[in-house]
């Protein structure tokens, strides 16, 4: 009996082996291949929003409020579709109690700020030579206004030393982007004693410290510079030398304004091998200036590529724009030069001052600005 049971057990084990049903060692898990990251980040940067009183009044509504969608409609939906949409807000929102005013001491309705939000801007630059036109109160009232819109990144002005010492780093599609903003000065108006933190001035020691912090803590660094010589279509030595230094310190993209005219674009390479793309000046976005070259501005249209580790510039363009207003100074709009017409130019408000203007004349100015520089950056229309 015991032998029959033993034989049965042996037979059962043999049958299991034949069937291949024996207990197997579990297979080692196969690691999944990492999925490559190729995120495109689009950036659209506009020049100085220079609000002379005719520009301010162009947005006045019957109920006394102001609205400025008409200044941006020709660039939509590009502004709203950009991952990072930037504008240089040359003037402060000091509040109605201080009185709205134009040149030389500007104060603009905060309704412009509301329009910037509605139009899809993500970053607003306030470091300009006019930022102290209404003193500390003008800056503080501007900061108070922006507290209502915490999603907007406000650069160049601060409510405290601690805030000023904190470099702005934003995460966009997984990439950490550092944003810096400085002005060369404030038209001789000194920073209030004890409130030196209000405005970010161009100071090489501070810029170096901010840039190196950004290099270590972000994937890409953009510096917005209010600099240069007014009405000069070529960068001055200060701009070129500082651009080289900033490139050395790790800044990847520099976008400038202030001269009221456009200046060229170029790649610079520092001694340590870093490369940086520099838009020396985008000129005015909008203004009521009266010279043909002041009416011509530019937009930086940049596509960044994030691969999960680093950010590179995949594409970049300089798109010329024209501020249009009629002879009554009541109707303002801004067009890509590629969409502007000579019919519109014939009725431009600067014609009584400078004579006939044309699309060809503005294209000639662009050619003169980029003489000796890489003209392939210039495109007259935005990519779809």
Image: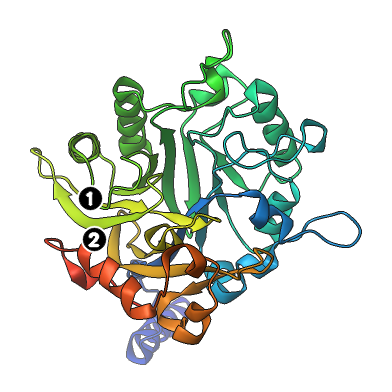
Residue 369 disc label: 2
Instruction: Name the quadrant containing residue 362.
Output: bottom left
Of the numbered discs 2 and 1, the one sitting upstream in the chain is 1
Marks 1 and 2: in contact by CB < 8 Å? yes
Relative to residue 22, is residue 352 depicted above or below?
above
Residue 77 in view (yes/no): no
**Is 167 or 206 nearer to us in this picture?**
206
| Image quadrant where one finds the C terminus | bottom left
User: Image check: 294 left or right of 63?
Assistant: left
Residue 256: x and y, percent?
36, 47
Q: Residue most toward the left? A: 271
Q: Give me the disc on residue 151.
A: none
Can you name the residue that lies furthest to the right here? 63
Q: Residue visible at 64% across and 63% down?
A: 329
Spot occupied by residue 114 in the image (x, y as percentages of width and height): 73, 53
**Around disc 2, counting alpha carbons within 10 Å, would you say few (fewer than 14), some (14 to 19), or many (20 or more)?**
many
Colour scheme shown: rainbow
Q: Quadrant of residue 368?
A: bottom left
The residues bearing labels 2 and 1 have C-alpha atoms spaced at a distance of 7 Å
Residue 169 image point, x, y percent: 47, 41
Q: Position of residue 254 (x, y in %)?
A: 32, 47
Going by the image, does 200 lie left or right of 151? left
Residue that appears at 43% across and 80% down: 9
Q: Nearer the viewer, residue 310 or 33?
A: 310
Q: Which residue is mark 1?
A: 234
| Disc 1 secondary structure class | loop
Q: Element at badge 2?
A: helix
Q: Residue at x 39, y 81 (%)?
A: 13
């Amino acid at each position: 009996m015991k032998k029959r049971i033993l034989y049965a057990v042996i037979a059962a084990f043999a049958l299991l082996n034949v069937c291949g049903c024996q207990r197997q060692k579990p297979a080692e898990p196969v690691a999944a291949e990492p999925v490559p990251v190729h995120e495109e980040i689009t950036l659209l940067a506009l020049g100085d929003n220079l609000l002379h009183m005719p520009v301010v009044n162009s947005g006045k509504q019957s109920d006394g409020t102001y609205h400025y969608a008409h200044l941006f409609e020709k660039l939509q939906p590009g502004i709203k579709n950009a991952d990072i949409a930037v504008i240089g807000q040359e003037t402060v929102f000091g509040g109605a109690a201080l009185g709205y005013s134009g040149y030389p001491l500007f104060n603009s309705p905060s309704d412009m700020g509301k329009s910037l939000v509605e139009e899809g801007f993500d970053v607003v630059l306030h470091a300009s030579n006019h930022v102290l036109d209404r003193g500390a109160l003008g800056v503080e009232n501007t900061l108070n206004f922006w507290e209502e819109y915490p999603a907007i990144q406000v650069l160049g002005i601060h409510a405290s030393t601690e805030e000023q010492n904190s470099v702005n780093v934003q995460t966009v599609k997984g990439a950490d982007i550092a944003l810096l903003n400085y002005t060369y000065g404030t038209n001789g108006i000194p920073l209030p004693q004890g409130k030196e933190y209000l405005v970010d001035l161009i100071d090489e020691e501070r810029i170096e410290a901010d840039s190196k912090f950004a290099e270590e803590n972000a994937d890409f660094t953009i510096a917005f510079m209010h600099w240069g010589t007014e009405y000069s279509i070529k960068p001055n030595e200060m701009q070129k030398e500082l651009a080289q230094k900033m490139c050395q310190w790790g800044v990847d993209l520099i976008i400038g304004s202030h001269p009221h005219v456009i200046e060229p674009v170029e790649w610079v390479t520092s001694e340590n091998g870093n490369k940086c793309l520099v838009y020396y000046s985008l000129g005015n976005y909008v203004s009521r200036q009266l010279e043909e070259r002041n009416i011509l501005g530019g937009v930086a249209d940049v596509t960044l590529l994030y691969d999960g580790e680093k950010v590179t510039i995949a594409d970049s363009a300089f798109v010329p724009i024209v501020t249009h207003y009629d002879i009554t100074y009541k109707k303002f709009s801004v067009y890509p030069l590629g969409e502007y017409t000579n019919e519109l130019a014939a009725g431009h408000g600067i014609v009584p001052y400078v004579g006939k203007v044309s699309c060809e004349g503005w294209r000639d100015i662009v050619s003169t600005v980029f003489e000796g520089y890489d003209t392939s950056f210039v495109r007259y229309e935005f990519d779809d």
